[in-house]
Image (cartoon, rainbow, N blue to C red):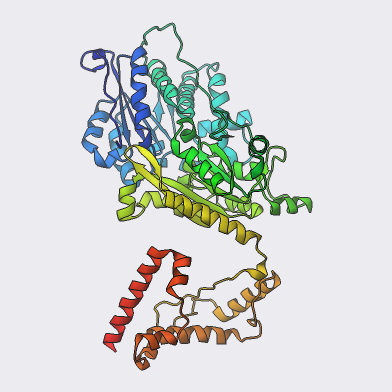
Amino acid sequence: RASDTLPAVHPAASPASTPHAKHLVFITGFERFNAALYSAALGRIAARAPGVLVSHFTDADIAARPEELAEALEDADLFFASLVFDYDHVEWLLPRVERVPVRMVFESALELMAVTKVGGFEVANPGESGKGLPPAVRMVLEKLGVVKSEEDKLAGYLSLLKTGPKLLKMVPGKKARDLWRWLSAYAYWNAGGMKNFASLVWFLSKEVLDLELVDPELPVPEVEEVPQMGLVHPEAGGRYFGDPAEYVRWHDERFPDRRDNPRVGIMLYRKHVVSELAYISQLIEFFEDSGLTPIPVFINGVEAHIVVRDWFTTTDEQAARRSGIKVCTLKEKQATRVDAIVSTIGFPLVGGPAGSMAAGRSTNTASRILTAKNVPYIVAAPLLIQDVASWVTQGIAGLQSVVLYALPELDGAIDAVALGGLVGDKIQLVPTRLNRLVGRVKKWIALRRKENAEKMVAIVLYGFPPGVGAAGTAALLNVPKSLRKLFEEMHEQGFDVGNALEVDPEEIVAQVRDADTIFEGSGMKFAKSLREALSKISVVSSEKCDDWLGPIDSKRIFFSLFLALKKRQKRL
């Protein structure tokens, strides 16, 4: 089930039957898998707020069920949205939510976040300031000294959730009170889980919409807190570890035979851990069964760079620090060494989902952190807004590919593996994709450990259009001299470049052009058969291609090549 509209469960919940009834409309992005959680919360909500109607939609419903959503928004007293980024979705929503009296939007497109309004508190467009946070929140952060650096401001945002509501509750003035309501609502939402969602609805009903709850003397429960960051393991009995060092001590004692396995830092969505989604345990156990030791850290999303910077260290970083080079902050007593880093979150390393609308602005920071670690950084995640069937038949959808490929690549991710997708309202991992991820992680680690002299490097020259002598050309760039510089640098770093430094680089480029011409151009005129044409160029056997690319991709390439050669031969 892709989504639910949560119906009234008590006759008094109908807006028509109760003059004080309130209607709350929620739109949650990247969360189709949690429909059961919101349904389960209904009974709990109705016990104290029978006059409240809660309608829940996912971001997919904006396109799939626009009439229902439009009708719900027309009647809404409060609009709540999270993780809504798609441009078309935002354009559709903006004119329809402006009439809703109370609007709360978190971690979404800037244009949508800008409509937030809680009484006298309004969120100005964060993009205008260029700092990524609402001015009022930024001011409180600075006053409280929650964060020390620009890159940590979004993570400081979450730290403010703990201290801000308690402090603001004592500050006089309506705007301060409204800001308290906004921060408190996000604290419930951010904590996640069925009980916190029910408490969020009670809080909004009582404190924001002035609806009297059943047992009015009974306070709304406090947020049931799970650490903002921590580590988890399926065999730890529900225990959350405070830092990687604590986790490794437990893991080494629990699994002494795995102490020498390569370690892989894995970043997980905190909400998925809190919601006890089955794929988390499956992923961790698959790594361990494959001879790798996962260091599974859960985060909200905005702290990814903090985990990589402060909690993961590497052999290269330790060597640099011993020589006095300290590029990043590092919490030595809490950190542990890793051989690779895998993010199951995607989005930018700095800011996560909340920083995706400013993608590119923090790439220097992300690059600095990843360069200091100098280990493979891979993004491998299940598709949270796409079902497995559409993925198999149509490939990865646009927004999903931006999250999984484009944004992380700007930071320096070197590989990406889709692990699965939605089957109904559950996230399901595909075993072959898990095998692919683990296999690639192992090979990247092995490559890191291999001496440079033993590594084989392929150099690809630009050559479009083919067959017309364009190979090795580039606007405003001397390709032969650039090749020479590259070979010299590789030689200095210990790579075996053969006799490349003795050969005129112009001759190397000329050989590439000749091969291109033989394959695509006039050389084919003198070939009496495909076999003869192929004999004039370097070829790779189908078995080797299978090893490199896998059977599906290699067959597709060979079939395309065969058709292209047959077509050209007919022309000649």
In percent of width and height, residue 571 lies at 27, 86
User: Is 425 on the left-hand or right-hand side of 11?
Assistant: right
Where is 218 relative to 336, above or below? above
**Residue furthest toward the right?**
323
* Quadrant (top left, top right, bottom left, bottom right) of the C terminus: bottom left
Where is 257 relative to 515, above or below? above
Q: Is residue 418 visible?
A: no
Please identify the quarter of the rendering in which residue 37 is found.
top left
**Residue furthest toward the bottom?**
526
Where is 271 relative to 309, above or below? above
At x 26%, y 16%, the residue is 13
142 and 533: which is toward the camera:
533
At x 42%, y 73%, the residue is 542
Q: Is residue 480 visible?
A: yes
In percent of width and height, residue 381 lies at 45, 47
Please identify the quarter of the rendering in which residue 212 is found.
top left
Where is 138 relative to 164, above or below? below
Please identify the quarter of the rendering in which residue 38 is found.
top left
Q: How many marks?
A: 0
In percent of width and height, residue 154 lies at 54, 38
2 and 326: which is toward the camera:
2
At x 47%, y 15%, the residue is 221
User: Is 252 on the left-hand or right-hand side of 387?
Assistant: right
* Quadrant (top left, top right, bottom left, bottom right) of the N terminus: top left
In percent of width and height, residue 333 lies at 72, 38
User: Is 528 on the left-hand or right-hand side of 155?
Assistant: left
